[in-house]
Image (spheres, grey):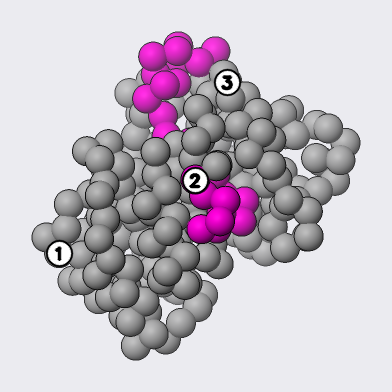
Amino acid sequence: MNLTLQKGEELLDQIIAAPHHLGADQQVIFAVPFPYIPMAQQKIAGLKEVFIAAQNCSNKKSGAYTGETSVEILQSVGISYVVIGHSERREYFNESNQFLAEKVNICLENHIHPIFCCGEALDVREANTQNAFVAKQLEESLFHLSAEQIQQVVIAYEPIWAIGTGKTATSEQAQEIHAFIRSQFAAKYGAAVAENISILYGGSVKGSNAKELFSQPDVDGGLVGGASLIASEFVTIISSLK
């Protein structure tokens, strides 16, 4: 929830103006506030492998839910990605695993890719129970999906304990939990399906650490927070894709 329309336009202009060399299997997705979606869609028109995402959606198809935004509405304005279950939504708006499963379902029913966020807080990490915690998030929100459906979902791992706490997750820690997440999908759906699922890292990704993070075998990209508000930082992160 940052930037006025004018500042948002300026930021997008600066990022888009920089030279990008995206591979056929790489994408840049801008998750913008709802009112800025038409502006952002216009800015990226004609750009390959660049998309606009919504930061949230309703779990309801339509109806008397004032202030909510349905996936049907998002689809009608050309949105193909929606962030689901961001740690802030879970914490501040009490979104449960079961509630997020409903959002995932309605996204897939409307041909929208969920960017599904998972991850643990500091107390869970300090108790060394992060694997079980994340496994439960995946199981309760995603494991009802078919193998075909799960490959339409992007996973974003957020180490909440490393965001704004002064603690830092190392690239080795990122790889360890990403490999665990992929192993959970492999156990459920098979290795071939697991390899076809993108797992993004969302723990204070910056221009200075992106290359090292993205060099890890199971880190497929980043879910970028504060650094995305600085054009030069975000451009550096994009250029760090392996």
User: Residue at 53% across / 24% down in the picture?
Assistant: 182
Residue at 34 percent across and 40 percent down: it is: 108
Q: Tell me the SS state at disc 2.
A: helix
**Helix, strand or loop at disc 3?**
helix
Q: Is 29 or 64 nearer to us in this picture?
A: 29
Q: Give me the disc on residue 131.
A: none
Q: Horizontal placement of 115 versus 44: left or right? A: right
* x, y percent for residue 126: 86, 40
Query: Element under label 1?
Result: loop
Determine whether 215 is above or below 189 in the image: below
Amino acid tagged 3: Gln
Q: Is residue 110 visible?
A: no
Instruction: Identify residue for label 2.
Output: 211
Q: Residues within 10 Å of mark 2 (few under 14, many from 20)?
A: many
Residue bearing mark 1: 45
Q: Count the marks: how many?
A: 3
> What residue sits right under mark 3 in the picture?
184
Question: Residue type at mark 1?
Answer: Ala
Q: Nearer the viewer, mark 2 or mark 3?
A: 2
Q: Which is more foreground, mark 1 or mark 3?
A: 1
Label 2 to label 3: alpha-carbon separation: 26 Å
What residue range appears in magenta? 186-211
Residue displayed at 50% across by 35% down: 215
Side of 162 relative to 70 (left or right)? right
x, y percent for residue 174: 63, 37
Please tell me in which quadrant of the rendered image residue 236 appears.
bottom left
CB atoms at circles 1 and 3 under 8 Å apart?
no
Categorize mark 3 by other alpha carbons within 10 Å: few (<14), some (14-19), many (20+): many
Q: CA distance from mark 1 to mark 3?
A: 37 Å
The reply to whether the magenta stretch includes residue 189 is yes
Label 2, label 1: how many angstroms apart (C-alpha)? 28 Å
